[in-house]
Image: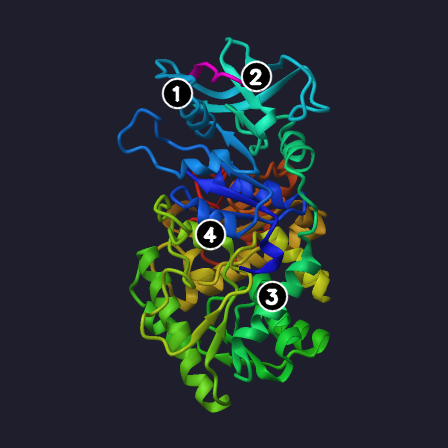
Amino acid sequence: MNESHKHGVVVLDFGSQYTQLIARRIRENNVFSEILPHSTTFSDISEREPKAVILSGGPSSVFDESAYKYDPEILSADFAVMGICYGLQLMAHHFNGTVEPGTHGEYGFASVKVLKENSLFASVPEESKVWMSHMDRVSVIPDGWEKLAESSNGIVASMCNPAEKLYATQFHPEVAHTEFGQEIIRNFLFGIAGCEPAWNPGAIIEEQVALIREKVGDGNVLCGVSGGVDSSVVSALIHKALGEQCTSVLIDHGLMRKNEAETCVSALREGLGVHIESYDESEIFLKKLQGITDPEQKRKIIGEQFIRSFERISQSLGDFSFLAQGTLYPDVIESGSSVGDTAEVIKSHHNVGGLPDDMKFDLIEPLRDLFKDEVREVGRELGLPDSLIGRHPFPGPGLAVRILGDITEERLDTLREADDIFMSILREEGLYDDIWQAFSVLLPVKTVGVMGDQRTYEDVLALRAVTSTDGMTADWFRMPDDVLSKISNKIVNSVRGVNRVVYDITSKPPGTIEWE
């Protein structure tokens, strides 16, 4: 157990779609948080010396035989405990309150009224809007507990046993739709649990440098750089920890954005003195992807070939036992590789679900527990330029998952040019930094058009732009009409093979950010 991880908050995952948001909201307050399976024993939790434990929401009912189990000793410990949604119902049920099966659920916005002054709702108005997502409800709170708030229909919205530092909300304070959710979380962390705001970029760097040095010893590390923010931060971090023991390698798989490789190599080599080499492996990757249209298969092919290329290249560079890569927490979650037994596979990220079992490297993934915005802050602390840190996220498989259907050099060139126009206009209009991620997608669809009084039958290009903080949820960006028109006109008139441009207005959920 890392010392810096002690005295934080443990989030027990009962299968909620919002569990990762709970952890993220805690970290936004500079408090370390860790998600563990619902089945984690009290002994394992106690080893972390947490200030608090939070019980997440979940899809189960306390009445289900298959309901996720937990160690009840958690609820009699010295640390503070907060239950959210299903967590509230678990606590009520454990302490002999009454939980009733719901016939009409409460979903979406609800109005909540605070009934009395209390630590959890300090500085929160008497009435506010919250986000509900539950079917069952608590009709009678346990003996010794107090009802803190109720929704407009009289349902228990929050309750507590302050003497035992036990608190619970039926609503989701971690969701942005809850008006004063951050205040409630902050009140619990600092006013009730007694947490200290010690988790920050400097602490993350210090911790990871120590861990990297301990793991690698006098060995050598090959650091894979893709051109995106994550791998660039990893490269800078490994370089800080190991110096000459680290060699960064950028493999150009032929699926990068326009001028991507050159920009990344220059920023790391000239800006930070990182030892980095670049290799053009595009012919190999494109040959293996020929005729492949299934996105999961694309990711796995790319993931395996990355490793094979690194293995071959490493032989000419020296003796390397370790491979460092920029895996993030959302990558792990969406690949169904997070802790516990509740994770669903959304899509296999090439560096998680696509790695071969027989690779010779021992992996180093110093960003594996971090969200994207945390990575950016770490990068700034390390001295990476804003021109690199502020770039929109870019998937490891690159344009392979932004070309739906067959991947050919011709289609790659088309997408690169169109995407470059999209990014250039966003920068010209001062919108680039307002958007978390924007990109173009080339569809396997042809449409009829007319250009110069002649019929055309060419490709459709989709534009995607979203706002987000952590990549787990996202909302589509409200692009000004005149900017959309400018982008569309320039693409259609400048990029051969595209005669129609559409704009994606789907949020996450239900969609993902990337199309594949």
Q: Residue furthest left?
A: 65
Determine the secondary structure under disc 3: helix
Distance from label 4 to label 2 (Cα)? 53 Å
Q: Earlier in the sequence, mark 2 or mark 1?
A: 1
Which residue, given by chain and number where applicable, does mark 3 sit on? 208
Give the answer, above or below, for where 426 lies relative to 310. Answer: above
Q: Are marks 4 and 2 in contact (CB under 8 Å)?
A: no
Q: Earlier in the sequence, mark 4 or mark 2?
A: 2
Which residue, given by chain and number where applicable, does mark 1 sit on? 135
Determine the secondary structure under disc 1: loop
Q: Nearer the viewer, mark 4 or mark 2?
A: 2
Q: Earlier in the sequence, mark 1 or mark 4?
A: 1
Residue at point 35% right, 45% down?
A: 344
Foreground residue among 168 and 128:
168
Distance from label 4 to label 3 (Cα)? 36 Å
Q: Amino acid at mark 2?
A: Glu
Q: Amino acid at mark 4?
A: Val
**Residue 225 image-quadrant placement:** bottom right
User: Dot 2, crowdedness within 10 Å: few (<14), some or many (≥20)?
Assistant: some
Distance from label 2 to label 1 (Cα)? 22 Å
Distance from label 2 to label 3 (Cα)? 43 Å
User: Dot 1, crowdedness within 10 Å: few (<14), some or many (≥20)?
Assistant: some
Residue range of the region highlighted in magenta in the rendering: 137-149
Query: In the figure, is residue 391 to the left or right of 451?
Result: right
Q: Is residue 353 visible?
A: yes
Q: Position of residue 207 (x, y in %)?
A: 62, 64
Which residue, given by chain and number where applicable, does mark 2 sit on? 146
Which residue, given by chain and number where applicable, does mark 4 sit on? 441
Q: Position of residue 490 (x, y in %)?
A: 59, 51
Q: Are marks 2 and 3 in contact (CB under 8 Å)?
A: no
